[in-house]
Image: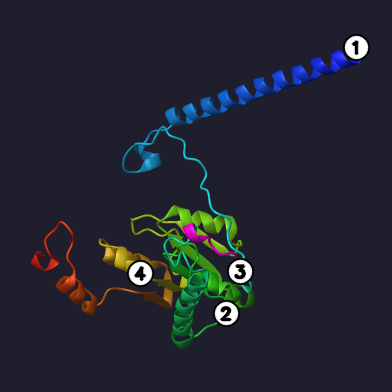
């Protein structure tokens, strides 16, 4: 009987202690967050303005489990994590990325004049749609694989699921890259300048700065034919036709 009472008391004390520690931990976390928010000024932390969700804690990003595809060394993003690229067809996603990689590789073979130790930057890498296909070059020829994207979500996906050989970071709208002068042998980007409306000249100068002399810059753009098509056929709903707008 005495041992049973002691056991009940011990279990009760353990539960009470556990609840007390949990409440204490919660208060410590809340107090720490309050101190952080009140200790630092807003501008150095946010740059432009104090956001609406300044006092809202941002939870960690949630991803669906990546796919393991036969014949692929690397995990593949789930449908919702492909940033709109072939969300319903994983094989199309892989083939599309591989075709773009082959296009870049053909230009490297044709123009660069080297095959070993190439430092390559995917300017607008998404979750590694194209960059993933240079993994063999990294392992076999010591290529340095770098990626940047203005969207934090695909960069976080790569940090969580891709090997450490992929060096990626989240960029900004400002034409600033965190690399020294003459750092890359190759910089490529698919449909990036087609989404940049301002500061083309500044971005080109920044890409030139981090590109080695004799390096290779490959970017897709809208040519005069594309703009002719847009200005003669496209109408914005609720707005006047582009053909009626003046520069």
Q: At which x and y percent is residue 82?
A: 47, 62
What count of labels does the image hold?
4
Magenta residues, as a range? 73-80
Q: Secondary structure at mark 2?
A: loop
Label 3 and label 2: CA atoms lie apart by 29 Å
Q: Secondary structure at mark 3?
A: loop
For label 1, the residue is 2
Q: At which x and y percent is residue 43?
A: 35, 38
Label 3 and label 4: CA atoms lie apart by 26 Å
Q: Secondary structure at mark 1?
A: helix
Magenta stretch, main secondary structure, is loop
Q: Is residue 183 visible?
A: no
For marks 3 and 2, give the one nearer the viewer: 3
**If you read the primary sequence from the N terminus, does the residue marked by circle 3 or circle 4 appear first?**
3
For label 2, the residue is 116
For image coordinates 58% across by 72% down, the residue present is 135
Q: Are marks 4 and 2 in contact (CB under 8 Å)?
A: no
Q: Are marks 3 and 1 in contact (CB under 8 Å)?
A: no
**If you read the primary sequence from the N terminus, does the residue marked by circle 3 or circle 2 appear first?**
3
For label 3, the residue is 69
**Which of the labelled discs sits on residue 26, or is there none?**
none
Say which quadrant the C terminus sits in: bottom left
Category of crowding for the residue at label 2, using alpha-carbon neighbours closer than 10 angstroms: few (below 14), some (14–19), many (at least 20)? few
């Amino acid at each position: 009987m005495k041992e049973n009472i002691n056991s009940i008391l011990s279990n009760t004390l353990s539960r009470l202690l556990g609840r007390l520690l949990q409440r204490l931990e919660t208060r410590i976390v809340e107090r720490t967050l309050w101190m952080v928010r009140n200790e630092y000024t807003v501008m150095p932390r946010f740059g432009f303005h104090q956001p609406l969700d300044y006092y809202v804690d941002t939870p960690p990003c949630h991803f669906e489990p990546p796919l393991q595809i036969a014949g692929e060394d690397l995990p593949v993003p789930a449908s919702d994590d492909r940033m709109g690229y072939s969300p319903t067809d994983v094989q199309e996603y892989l083939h599309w990325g591989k075709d773009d990689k082959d296009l870049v590789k053909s230009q490297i073979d044709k123009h660069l004049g080297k095959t070993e130790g190439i430092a390559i930057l995917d300017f607008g890498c998404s979750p590694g749609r194209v960059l993933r296909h240079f993994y063999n070059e990294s392992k076999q020829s010591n290529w340095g694989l770098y990626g940047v994207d203005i969207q934090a979500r695909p960069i976080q996906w790569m940090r969580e699921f891709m090997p450490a050989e992929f060096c990626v970071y989240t960029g900004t709208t400002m034409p600033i890259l965190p690399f020294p002068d003459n750092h890359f042998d190759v910089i490529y980007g698919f449909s990036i300048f087609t989404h940049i409306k301002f500061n083309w000249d500044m971005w080109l100068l920044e890409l030139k700065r981090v590109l080695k002399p004799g390096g290779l810059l490959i970017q897709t753009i809208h040519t005069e034919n594309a703009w002719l098509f847009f200005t003669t056929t496209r109408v914005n709903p609720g707005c006047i036709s582009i053909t009626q707008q003046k520069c």
